[in-house]
Image (cartoon, helix red, strand yellow):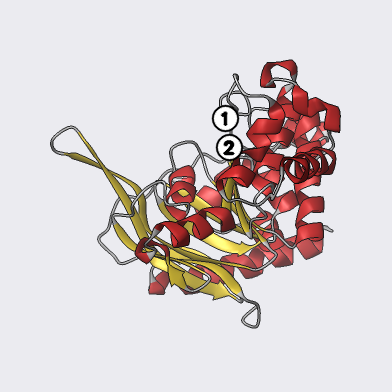
């Protein structure tokens, strides 16, 4: 992992918002993680945990309260000048949660997709612009003729494909997928996720995939970060977190995942996460196994290591 190129590095990110005169909401509170070239980093947690705010801070929609966000080694808060900002906006794109609200209903699809091409001057002529739009439509599984239609003429899944084509239009390096499937039917979700995986392989894209469904995040991600109330509570490989989630909140998310097994569902026990009272001890992400981190104190590391060994032993015995 250390030999791979870091595309994004988030260092002690804090994103606070003032609500009223005195109240302060710590939407993102001291979060750190890295994303490597060509991988998908899944960020999962319940609504309001700060995962979408993290994505918006990375895209510079929000100015961080504290901390650093490094994109290809450069602090994005220090990017100045129209040309440099244009380049940054081109390199980082977003796919939004709501495919209905994220597309301008008064614009034809071809103009929605070509908006970035026009802004960044990526086509030398109208013919080249149209050709590029047609190629993008076909890349995401639509037809070139769809470019003359308006968003209301498409289904939710088709609209999200249009949103993906719009993101791809400027040839980005990094795409933030902000819950791109949560508004879609389950059958369509798999199609969109498969499309994103195919595009990643073909174009060497790097993703931050934000969602609340841990099973879907596991399917698409190489590594997973679990967020709770503005903090990362666990980070590890997709397989490791899904099979051996250690933090009590991760265990709660895992216990909520249904399986197509009636016998299992009869006995499935839902774990309700009960946050422990603040004891004043310093907690941070600590490595309890290679590339597996849990939010805990130094004294709790040994307990989590023992818990991990027990889970692996029990799975071996039961398999």
Q: Residue furthest bottom?
A: 3
Q: Up-down: is 83 above or below 157?
A: below
Residue 178: tell me if it is visible. Answer: no
Where, by quadrant of the figure, is residue 139 drawn? top right
Quarter of the figure that contains the C terminus: bottom right
Residue shown at the point (65%, 66%) measured from the top left: 310
Residue 96, numbered circle: 2
- How far across and down, in percent of the image, does residue 11 sit? 41, 67
Of residues 291 and 309, the one drawn nearer to the viewer in this rendering: 291
Residue shown at the point (72%, 40%) measured from the top left: 126
Quarter of the figure that contains the N terminus: bottom right
Q: Residues within 10 Å of mark 2 (few under 14, many from 20)?
A: many
- How far across and down, in percent of the image, does residue 125 sit? 71, 45
Residue shown at the point (51%, 39%) measured from the top left: 46
Q: Which label sits in the foreground, 2 or 1?
A: 1
Q: Up-down: is 103 above or below 243?
A: above
Task: State left or right for residue 41 relative to residue 187.
Answer: left
Task: State left or right for residue 111 relative to residue 233.
Answer: right
Name the residue that disc number 1 marks. 102
Name the element at disc 1: loop
């Amino acid at each position: 992992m250390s030999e791979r190129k870091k595309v994004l590095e988030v260092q002690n990110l804090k994103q606070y918002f003032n609500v009223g005169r005195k109240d302060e909401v710590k939407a993102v509170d001291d979060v750190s993680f890295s994303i490597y070239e060509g991988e998908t980093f899944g960020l999962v947690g319940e609504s309001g945990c700060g995962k979408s705010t993290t994505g918006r801070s990375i895209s510079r929609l929000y100015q961080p309260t504290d901390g650093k966000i490094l994109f290809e080694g450069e602090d994005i808060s220090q990017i100045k000048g129209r040309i440099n900002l244009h380049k940054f906006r081109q390199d980082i794109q977003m796919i939004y949660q709501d495919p209905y609200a994220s597309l301008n209903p008064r614009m034809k699809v071809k103009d929605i997709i070509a908006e970035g091409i026009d802004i960044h001057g990526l086509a030398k002529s109208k013919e080249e612009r149209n050709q590029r739009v047609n190629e993008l439509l076909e890349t995401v599984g639509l037809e070139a003729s769809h470019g003359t239609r308006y968003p209301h003429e498409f289904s939710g899944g088709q609209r999200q494909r249009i949103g993906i084509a719009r993101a791809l239009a400027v040839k980005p390096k990094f795409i933030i997928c902000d819950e791109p499937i949560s508004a879609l039917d389950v059958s369509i979700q798999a199609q969109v996720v498969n499309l994103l995986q195919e595009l990643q392989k073909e174009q060497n894209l790097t993703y931050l995939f934000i969602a609340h469904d841990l099973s879907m995040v596991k399917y698409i991600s190489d590594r997973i970060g679990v967020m709770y109330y503005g903090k990362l509570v666990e980070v590890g490989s997709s397989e490791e977190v899904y099979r051996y989630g250690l933090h009590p909140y991760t265990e709660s998310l895992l216990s909520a995942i249904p399986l197509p097994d009636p016998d299992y569902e009869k006995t499935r026990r839902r774990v309700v996460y009960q946050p422990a009272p603040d004891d004043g001890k310093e907690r941070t992400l600590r490595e309890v196994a290679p590339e597996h981190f849990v939010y805990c104190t130094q004294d709790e590391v040994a307990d989590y290591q023992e818990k991990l060994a027990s889970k692996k032993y029990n799975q071996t015995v039961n398999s």
